[in-house]
Image (cartoon, rainbow, N blue to C red):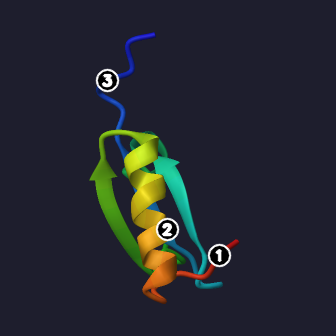
Amino acid sequence: MNDSSQKYYIIKKPEETCEILPSTQVEHKKDPDILATWGPFNTVEEAIACRVGLIRSGKCQPQ
């Protein structure tokens, strides 16, 4: 499993929640419901750590 080229993004939805998606689902989808995007992150762990920070800073709501 060589998935080193995979990147991850955090997207903010209208409900103010943030979810982590692989770049393949974000770059091909220009969704008008996406309020903000953070990334790319090299690993899902990095994206999770950033999402926790966004929740703590009030930029995202927990799901």
Q: Position of residue 61 (x, y in %)?
A: 60, 82
Q: Where is residue 58 in the image (x, y as percent from the top left)?
A: 48, 89
* Distance of label 2 from label 3 (alpha carbons): 23 Å
- Report crowding for label 1: few under 14, some 14 to 19, many 20 or more residues within 10 A (C-alpha): few
Of residue 53 and residue 7, the one placed in the foreground of this image is 53
Residue flagged by tag 2: what amino acid is it? Val
- 3 or 1: mark nearer the eye: 1
Left or right for 41, reference 22:
left
- Report crowding for label 2: few under 14, some 14 to 19, many 20 or more residues within 10 A (C-alpha): some
Which of marks 3 and 2 precedes in the sequence? 3
SS at badge 1:
loop
- Report crowding for label 3: few under 14, some 14 to 19, many 20 or more residues within 10 A (C-alpha): few
SS at badge 2:
helix
Q: Where is residue 45 in the image (x, y as percent from the top left)?
A: 45, 44
* Distance of label 3 from label 1 (alpha carbons): 28 Å
Query: Label 3: which residue?
Result: 4
SS at badge 3:
loop
Query: Label 1: which residue?
Result: 62
Q: Image quadrant of residue 17?
A: bottom right
Are the residues at dot 2 and dot 3 in contact (C-beta closer than 8 Å)?
A: no
Query: Label 2: which residue?
Result: 52
Q: State the residue lying farthest toward the top.
A: 1
Which of marks 1 and 3 precedes in the sequence? 3
- 2 or 3: mark nearer the eye: 2
At a point 36% along the width and 32% down the height, the residue shown is 6
Considering the image in quadrants, where does the C terminus appear? bottom right
At a point 49% along the width and 68% down the height, the residue shown is 52
Q: Residue 40 carries which label?
A: none
